[in-house]
Image (tube, rainbow, N blue to C red):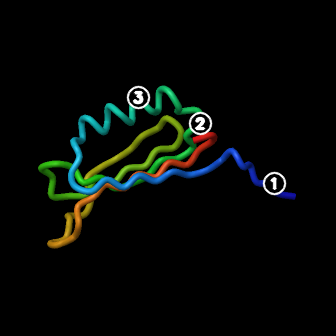
Amino acid sequence: EHEHDNSVSSISIIQPGNVDLELVQKWVGQLLQEKGAQIYRMKGVLSISNADEKFVYQAVHMLFRGNFDDKWEAGEPRESKLVFIGKNL
């Protein structure tokens, strides 16, 4: 029988506007160093300053991968969305 672990949850962050890719990478790197064992998965789309394309990323435990993907559509609100799934978040 399957039991649900109540210590596993998810947190989402939505930030309107553009973000600085270097600052985000620094923050995520520090977060993964400090809490990497507790973060099972991360994923999201970032609106990077001075970039016409969306930066799409995902991470499993401490393995992070991201790249620029589709362009932002005209009139589409630029915002960054980050989702974290893990234990004791």
Q: Which residue is mark 2?
A: 38
Please name the residue shown 17% across and 72% down the image. Answer: 75
Q: Position of residue 37 (x, y in %)?
A: 58, 32
Q: Position of residue 9 (x, y in %)?
A: 61, 50
Is 54 situated left or right of 28 in this image?
A: left
Q: Quadrant of residue 22?
A: top left
Q: Quadrant of residue 20?
A: top left
The residue type indicated by label 1 comes to: Glu
Is 86 situated left or right of 22 in this image?
A: right
Q: Position of residue 42 (x, y in %)?
A: 47, 47
Mark 1 vs 2, N-terminal side:
1
Please name the residue shown 23% across and 61% down the image. Answer: 78
Of 23 and 57, nearer the camera is 23
Mark 3 vs 2, N-terminal side:
3
Mark 3 vs 1, N-terminal side:
1
Q: CA distance from mark 3 to mark 2?
A: 13 Å
The residue type indicated by label 2 comes to: Gln
Query: Crowdedness of circle 1 by 10 Å Cα count: few (<14), some, many (20+)?
Result: few
Please name the residue shown 69% across and 44% down the image. Answer: 7
Tell me the quadrant of the picture where the C terminus can be found.
Answer: top right
Please name the residue shown 49% across and 35% down the image. Answer: 62
Q: CA distance from mark 1 to mark 2?
A: 19 Å
Q: Which residue is mark 3?
A: 30
Label 1: state its secondary structure: loop
The residue type indicated by label 3 comes to: Gln
Name the disc covering residue 3, or none: 1
Label 2: state its secondary structure: loop
Name the disc covering residue 23, or none: none
Q: Are marks 3 and 1 in contact (CB under 8 Å)?
A: no
How many numbered marks are there? 3
